[in-house]
């Protein structure tokens, strides 16, 4: 979808210039280089790798320059820091 501002000064109003519609199979093959024959095998490998891990939080990221994904463990301390920040934001919002 391509959109543009109705007027350059108004950042809130936009109009649709163009949109494209894709068939899902065509989109998968052409735009994201997905092979439907092996997509379920890839998903199964990711799930199998996740099942073998200890309980915790993880982040799955695709390398932007390679056809490779990385699974990173999120430290428990990062989760505690996030909860503290959310608590501080809530307290500021109430004040």
Image (cartoon, rainbow, N blue to C red):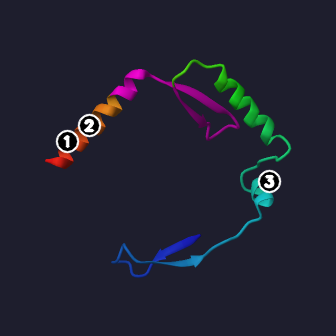
Q: Residues within 10 Å of mark 3 (few under 14, many from 20)?
A: few
Question: Which element type, helix, strand or loop, lies under badge 1?
Answer: helix
Residue 20: quadrant of the picture: bottom right
Q: What residue would you read off at disc 2?
A: 87
**What is the quadrant of the N terminus in the image?**
bottom right
Q: How much space separates mark 1 and mark 3, taking CA atoms?
A: 49 Å
Question: Which element type, helix, strand or loop, lies under badge 2?
Answer: helix
Spot occupied by residue 63 in the image (x, y as percentages of width and height): 62, 36
Q: Which residue is drawn at 80% across and 35% down?
A: 41
Up the image or down, 41 lies above or below 93; here it is: above
Q: Nearer the viewer, residue 86 or 13?
A: 86
Q: Which of marks 2 and 3 is nearer the N terminus?
A: 3
Viewed as shown, does residue 20 lie left or right of 72? right
Q: Which residue is drawn at 36% across and 73% down?
A: 11
Q: Which of marks 1 and 3 is nearer the N terminus?
A: 3
Q: Nearer the viewer, residue 25 or 83?
A: 83
Q: Which residue is drawn at 80% across and 57% down?
A: 25
Residue, far bottom: 7
Up the image or down, 49 lies above or below 64; here it is: above
Q: What residue would you read off at disc 3?
A: 29
The boundaries of the magenta stretch are 57-80
Q: How much space separates mark 2 and mark 3, taking CA atoms?
A: 45 Å
Residue 53: quadrant of the picture: top right
Question: Which element type, helix, strand or loop, lies under badge 3?
Answer: helix
Viewed as shown, does residue 76 lie left or right of 31? left
Viewed as shown, does residue 60 lie left or right of 95? right
* Marks 2 and 1 in Cβ contact (< 8 Å): yes
Q: What residue would you read off at disc 1?
A: 91
Spot occupied by residue 4 in the image (x, y as percentages of width and height): 48, 75
């Amino acid at each position: 979808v391509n959109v543009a501002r109705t007027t350059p000064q108004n950042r809130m109003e936009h109009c649709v210039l163009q949109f494209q519609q894709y068939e899902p199979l065509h989109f998968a093959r052409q735009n994201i280089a997905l092979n439907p024959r092996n997509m379920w095998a890839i998903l199964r490998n990711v799930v199998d790798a996740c099942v073998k891990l200890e309980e915790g939080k993880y982040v799955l990221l695709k390398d932007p320059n390679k056809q490779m994904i990385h699974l990173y463990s999120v430290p428990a301390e990062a989760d505690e820091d996030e909860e503290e920040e959310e608590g501080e934001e809530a307290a500021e919002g109430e004040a």
